[in-house]
Image (cartoon, grey):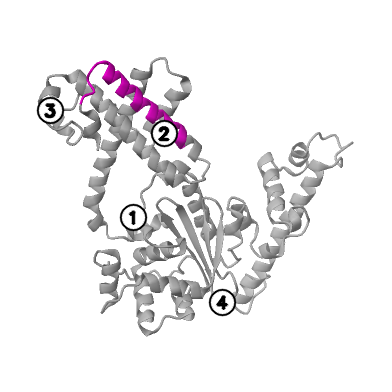
Amino acid sequence: MDGITRWADYPSYKKQLDTELSRAAEGFVRIGYLLKAARDTDILEGSGYSSVTEFAQAEYGLDKTQVSRFIRINDRFAEGGCSDKLESRYQGFGYAKLTLMLQLPDALNEALSPAYSKADIQALKDEVDEERAVTDIERMLENEPEATAALETDLEKVLYQIGEHHPDIYRDIWAAWRQGLTEDDLQDILAPDGQKMYSEAIPGTGRLMLALTAGKDAGAVSLVNIRDGHREKYSWESLCRAFQKILIPGNTAEESWAATYHRQMPVAEADRTGRAKPKVVKASENTHRTNQASQEAPQKTADREDCQDSQIMQETADTAADTKGTSTAAGVQGSRMAAGVQTSLEEDVIPGQMGLENYDGIVPEGQHGALQEDPQRMDWLLRWRTAMESYKVLQSAMRQAGEHPVWHDIKTAYLAADQLAGDIHAAMEARETAGGIDGSYE
């Protein structure tokens, strides 16, 4: 190793390397700025090149993707969005981190610091990608558990789920709470290294990222909605108050946790790896920390119910094609949207394939025998009930949508289901088969 400088210790070596990487990042910003000049001015006139991409490829071996990345880094991270200087808050990150940060919402980037590793920022990107893979309507149709629905704020909901998914954190906070929970206690427990991010997926809302920084500065605690980029700033004192609403008294932490989450507290696994813990905790990892045994049976039941609901909604789409025939294209499309709000079937349900015993509560009392002898009437009745169920599901979805843009799509499907139910009922009346229906639905 002759000829290589020797450093006094690792910190001094790393400090020098960090400085050089920071300078490299600033160099990338300057490169982006110069490439923008080639793109937006007439500087290439007379050079023989017709575009910045042709110029960069021929002179420097930079392909179109690399040119675009340099320019985007300048757009996002240079002073004023167009400068040869890196904005001060992004100094120290380095090119690799900034490249990943290009794909994150501004609200998340603002909560980051150079202390976050490339792996941490990659974990953030994974969370963003997973949330973007879920459509707005899929999120809106999720049923939020009663426990979180009863809480007033998103902050309280996130803290509630952190306590559930991280029993070790709940145990430490409960112990501190018994002695009088303070801001310093929470900082030591939730962000022992000074900075930490926790991602939690709230049904009906989506992933929320709780970003924590030790200290008394305003905005040391922030909650970012990954779906829409909205950021709320809080204080550590706010976290103290929120936790005090969640914690349930008990003689032990285990007793308190069980009373809060309605199952036995899992046994914490000791970490013997010796590796530093990541600063970003992903929501996708939290599902593995819950007591799977206590949830296995309910999940199977829910899966069966989802399948049954899907079958009902698929019949609504089939009915739309059978009964509306010459209806407008918009009406048919809306009816199929009504069918699409549930998971699609792997197999189509054929009307009349199931027996009367599968439809308790649908068939009017006292008419099972008559309908058994009249399968055509039974088929019409089931179609009408299916359309009404679709109508109710979409009516509820409209209320949940509020002013969200997806409300208009839901309304189209809702009106189609309403029209479909009316058409079926009218057809049944025309065939003199509608007797007793109105009184049976409720």
**Residue at which label 1 appears:** 145
Which structural element holds mark 1? loop
**Residue at which label 3 appears:** 368
Q: CA distance from mark 1 to mark 4?
A: 34 Å
Q: Amino acid at mark 1?
A: Pro
Q: Earlier in the sequence, mark 3 or mark 1?
A: 1
Q: Is residue 383 above or below residue 117?
A: above
Query: In the image, which is nearer the foreground, mark 2 or mark 1?
Result: 2
> Which residue is located at x 78 percent, y 36 percent?
51
**Rendered image: mark on residue 215:** 4
Q: Residues within 10 Å of mark 4 (few under 14, many from 20)?
A: some
- The image quadrant that residue 324 belongs to is top left
Q: CA distance from mark 4 to mark 2?
A: 50 Å
Residue 264 point in image, percent of width and height: 24, 66
> Quick check: can you spot residue 135?
no
Query: In the image, which is nearer the foreground, mark 3 or mark 1?
Result: 3
Magenta residues (range): 410-435
**Residue at which label 2 appears:** 414
Residue 308 point in image, percent of width and height: 26, 36
Cβ–Cβ below 8 Å for labels 3 and 1?
Answer: no
Q: Earlier in the sequence, mark 4 or mark 2?
A: 4
Q: Is residue 385 above or below residue 120?
A: above
Magenta region includes residue 89 = no
Give the quadrant of the C terminus: top left
